[in-house]
């Protein structure tokens, strides 16, 4: 399967502002790219590209006053299979975990492990360890929390989601991550593309998506407490402790979002047709909401 990926994000800047972006496909998917994954910036600015402390491809620019546009369109090859399932995957005792995953057992900005530890044990302490326990966490969050874009809040934490029982995709993942960590299962936040491939089309504008990864049987596995079904075409962009580490854009000053479009769909048929009929293929984009952070 070939998936067309892209975005068009624009800001209005009143005074010079540094901006950090996480808009590239994650390095773990680099070998699957079939077109360059390049961040295009208008007006042209000096950009500093680097890997952040979590291994994500990041970019830093200083945006002058006026309009600034970040955009890209690329193509990635995907297996076309749903998320891998490891029904027999075991938990590892904390003393046997690789040291690099230990931070994903701790409290973080949106995941108050200490405050929800007793709740996690009450809800899931008797569930068999391993994959079944993580799936039980996803089932509970999926069933107990109501999804709605009107519930979006930049300050809601896992405890807030547990108390209010509402949220958007990041809130579902924060609560599931917190429960997993409280059960001594390393869990980290993930964000990227998730188009409506193999499922009914969502009538809402397309956006980047959030899910989480749990460490079982010596590897990371994708879980999604919001959708709670294996999905096709999940393309990772960034991982971190929580949404703080994975903001698509972070502006260190005032930056007013004026346009936000995201593209993610199965382009296999279009590519094949274009190769047969014409060497030129034009990508389109879809209206979407933003993941951004202002400091």
Image (cartoon, rainbow, N blue to C red):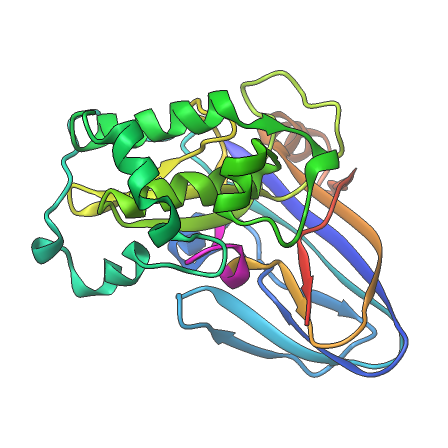
Instruction: Where is residue 2? Give x, y as percent.
Output: 53, 35
Seen in the picture, residue 174 relative to 30 is either above or below; the reply is above
> Can residue 160 be seen in the rendering of this structure?
yes
Using the rendered view, name the quadrant where residue 84 is placed.
top left
Left or right: 248, with 1 as reference point:
right
Instruction: Where is residue 272? Give x, y as percent.
Output: 60, 29
Q: Where is the C terminus found, in terms of image quarters?
A: bottom right
> Can residue 85 be seen in the rendering of this structure?
no
In the rendered image, the residue lying farthest to the top is 200
Residue, x 41% and y 58% (percent of image)? Answer: 241
Instruction: Where is residue 192? Give x, y as percent.
Output: 54, 47
Q: Nearer the viewer, residue 274 or 284?
A: 284
Q: Is residue 117 magenta?
A: no
Using the rendered view, name the quadrant where residue 71 is placed.
bottom right
Q: Nearer the viewer, residue 142 or 264?
A: 142
Residue, x 31% and y 28% (percent of image)? Answer: 123
Residue, x 82% and y 60% (percent of image)? Answer: 10
Using the rendered view, name the quadrant where residue 220 is placed.
top left
Left or right: 60, with 66 as reference point:
left
Q: Which residues fall within the magenta stretch?
A: 236-245
């Amino acid at each position: 399967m070939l998936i067309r990926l892209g975005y068009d994000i624009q800001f209005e800047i009143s005074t010079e502002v540094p901006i950090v972006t996480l808009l590239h496909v994650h390095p773990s998917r680099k070998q699957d790219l079939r077109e360059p994954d390049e961040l295009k910036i208008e007006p042209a600015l000096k950009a500093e590209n680097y890997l952040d402390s979590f291994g994500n491809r990041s970019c830093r620019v200083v945006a002058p006053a006026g309009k600034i546009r970040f955009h890209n369109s690329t193509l990635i090859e995907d297996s076309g299979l749903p998320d891998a399932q490891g029904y027999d995957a075991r938990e590892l005792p904390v003393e046997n975990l690789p040291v690099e995953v230990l931070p994903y057992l701790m409290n973080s900005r949106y995941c108050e492990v200490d405050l929800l530890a007793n709740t996690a044990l009450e809800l899931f302490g008797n569930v068999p360890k391993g994959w079944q326990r993580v799936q039980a966490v996803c089932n509970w969050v999926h069933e107990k929390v109501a999804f709605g874009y009107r519930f979006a809040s930049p300050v809601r934490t896992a405890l807030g989601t547990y108390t209010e029982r509402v949220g958007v995709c990041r809130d579902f993942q924060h609560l599931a991550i917190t429960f997993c960590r409280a059960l001594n299962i390393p869990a980290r936040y993930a964000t990227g593309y998730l188009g409506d491939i193999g499922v009914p089309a969502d009538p809402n504008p397309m956006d980047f998506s959030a899910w989480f990864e749990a460490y079982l049987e010596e590897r990371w596995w994708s879980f999604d407490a919001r959708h709670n079904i294996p999905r096709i075409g999940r393309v990772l962009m960034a991982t971190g402790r929580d949404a703080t580490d994975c903001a698509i854009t972070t502006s260190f000053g005032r930056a007013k979002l004026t346009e936000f479009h995201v593209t993610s769909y199965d382009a296999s048929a279009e590519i094949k047709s274009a190769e047969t009929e014409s060497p030129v293929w034009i990508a389109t984009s879809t209206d979407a909401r933003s993941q951004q952070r202002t400091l």
